[in-house]
Every structure is written in C-alpha cells, then in structure tokens.
Amino acid sequence: MENPNDPVDVDRATRAGEAAFGMTQFLSTTDSGIGGNNFASLINIADPKNPPGDLSIGQLNPIFTQQVAGALAPYVGDMVGVDEKYTGTGGFGDLGPVEATRVFALLDGDPKAGGIINGAALAQASALDKAFAVGAVNGEDSWLLGYSSGNLHALVEAGLGAEVVDRNLDSEAADAALRQQRSEAYGVSQWLAAGVVSFIPGGAVINPLANSVALMLQDDYVNGAGAAVSATPSYSGESFTTGLGIDNIRMHSMLSALVEDGRVDVNDLNQGLVRDGRLMTLDEMDRAVGLDRTVGMIPNALETAGVSGIDRLDYLRVADSAGVAVGGIIFPDHLGAGESFNTMLVNGVGNQRANGWPR
C-alpha cells in the first residue's frame, strides 16, 4: 500500500490482498466444496494433442499462468506468514506450506511464470536478510526474521521439486530442469531485489514488492524461457545449499544492505570483495577467485560493521532450520518423492496439523 496511514489506501490494499488470497485458495484446494480437487484438475489436464498424456495449467495456458504469477508475486511474503510491515500488503489470509507449494508448482509449469513467482520469493527473502542486518546494527533483536527468509527459500525449492516430480522425469533430466529453473529464479530475484529495499536515516524500509514486479512485467524483463532478459547472473543452478551456498547468499545480502545504507564504506572492505569501487556480486566473486577465498571475508566485514557473530549465526541457524522443516512437511522422509507428491499435494491426506510455517 502506498500510505498505511491513509484509510483509502489501506482499504484498497486489503481488498487486493483478499482477492489474491482467494486466487491461491482456488488454485490450491483439494476440496472445492462440491467434491472437486482443483489442484489435481489443474496439474493434470488431459493433453488434447497427446492422449492419454496430461499437462499442467502452466504448460497448457502459459499466458494465463503468467498473469496469475504477476498478480500473486507481491504476496509471496504473505504466503509464508511474513508480517505485513515487511510486505506493504494487507488482507491476505493464512496459507500453509502444502497449499503454497501447490500454487508454486502450478505456476512453475510455465518457465516465465515460474521465473516471476520464484524470483519474487527470493527477492523478498533477500529484503528480509537486509532488514535483519540494518536492524542488528541498530541494536534491534531482528534475527527471528531468518525464519521467514528460510520459509521463502524452502517454498521455491518445494514448488520446483513438485513440478519436476509431476513431469516424471528421470534423475538426469530432473536435475537439469531444477538447475535451469533455479538459475532463472536467482537471476530474476537479483533484478527485483534492487528496488525492494530503500534506506532512511536510522533504518531500512522494505518497499512493496508490487512496485518492482509491475516494472518488470511492463518491461517484459523476463523472457519466454523464464530468464531475466539482461544481466542474468552466471549462477549454475545447483541447489542453493551446494551452489553459491544459501548462507553465502544471505550474508552477501546483509553486507550489501550496509554498503547501500552507507554504514560500510567499500574502500574499507577487503579489496577481494570489491571491483570498480563497488561490492562484487557472489557470481563475480566466484568467477574472479572462487567463493572459498572470498566468502570468508564477509562475516568479518559484518562484525566490523556491528552485526555480531552471535546474531548472524542465530539468523542463519533459524533460516536453515525453517528450510529443513518445510522440506520435511512437503516431502516426508518416510515417503519417496512421487508418493509425497501424490499424498501431500494431489490427494491432500497428509498430516494437516503439521502444515504450518516455522517461526
């Protein structure tokens, strides 16, 4: 919302949020009230050109799916329970991990829609990482934001994993598809993240994600393959835990925030982190001398700036634990990937009492 103190803006944002929540309910329900399983119907639509095969809504109607992704992208934080003061939204209800994963899996059926929704989720996570760092320097007890950052990363992974399982790919093809989709999501997130956080004296302000998403859609920044049209990072698309490293991504966002806020002068940083008078991206660090030689400098820079090692490690710990917990809800250890997909997502017969976001 443009002005949270303006009743008209609040009412408009509330109605928009209610509509977006209604859309997620429609997409994710397995019982529409008349015995209909909407999710199953949308993930398995009879392929008119290849009977008895089936397609997801993203594969069958990509334009519609892209429009839905653009409409829901501003609410990715709400989907995992982020406080509205960090999302700039209103009116969005409670959506559990299972339902949110269904929504992401449907949108991931089209590469461009997937790039939009996953990029928005990763950009929102980056904004929370930045808000933590600025808050920590200000002496605020903000490390619990790590849960929300972890939930957002986990939602991206769960949605991508579910969509790949639905396509029944062999392990090699599934790995290639995940790498491609992760790379595209990360590229889009880097573009979106630039406009999500602004800095004022004494703190950081997370701007509504809707603003950046609208600009991206207006400029068609995401191409038909789901990738950012220009300046896409070289990220290899490995799992965030084994590629650039999810903790490295979070810590880089933290340091970026302090540089952007003027609390850290790039000239005072170890020059292994700097190029052309600016903080390098993780991709640039990886290409230049390798992350193993550079990423160890970031914790020292954060601590020098006022982010204590204890706070930083607490933030990373709860973020990682959230990711593990959400993964365990969607893909329980005692079930294989295919059985998890059918049990938890398609048939909705899993343990609903466990269907909550870690926080």
Image: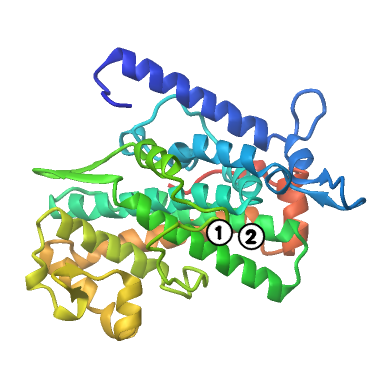
User: Closest to the observer: 4 or 148?
Assistant: 4
Q: Secondary structure at mark 2?
A: helix
User: Closest to the observer: 104 or 230?
Assistant: 230
Q: Which residue is mark 2?
A: 161
- Name the residue located 39 percent from the left edge and 58 percent from the top edge: 318
State the image quarter where residue 163 is shown: bottom right
Mark 1 touches mark 2? (CB < 8 Å): yes
Q: Is residue 306 left or right of residue 353?
A: left
Amino acid type at circle 1 is Glu
User: Closest to the observer: 305 or 110?
Assistant: 110
- Outermost residue on the top side: it is 8
- Name the residue located 65 percent from the left edge and 44 percent from the top edge: 62
In the rendering, at what x and y percent does residue 316 appear? 35, 63
In the rendering, at what x and y percent does residue 172 appear? 69, 76
Q: Residues within 10 Å of mark 1 (few under 14, many from 20)?
A: many
Residue 68 appears in the figure: yes
Q: Which residue is mark 1?
A: 157
Seen in the picture, residue 70 relative to 133 is either above or below; the reply is above
- Name the residue located 8 percent from the left edge and 65 percent from the top edge: 265
Amino acid type at circle 2 is Gly
Residue 266 — which label? none
- Name the residue located 78 percent from the left edge and 63 percent from the top edge: 168
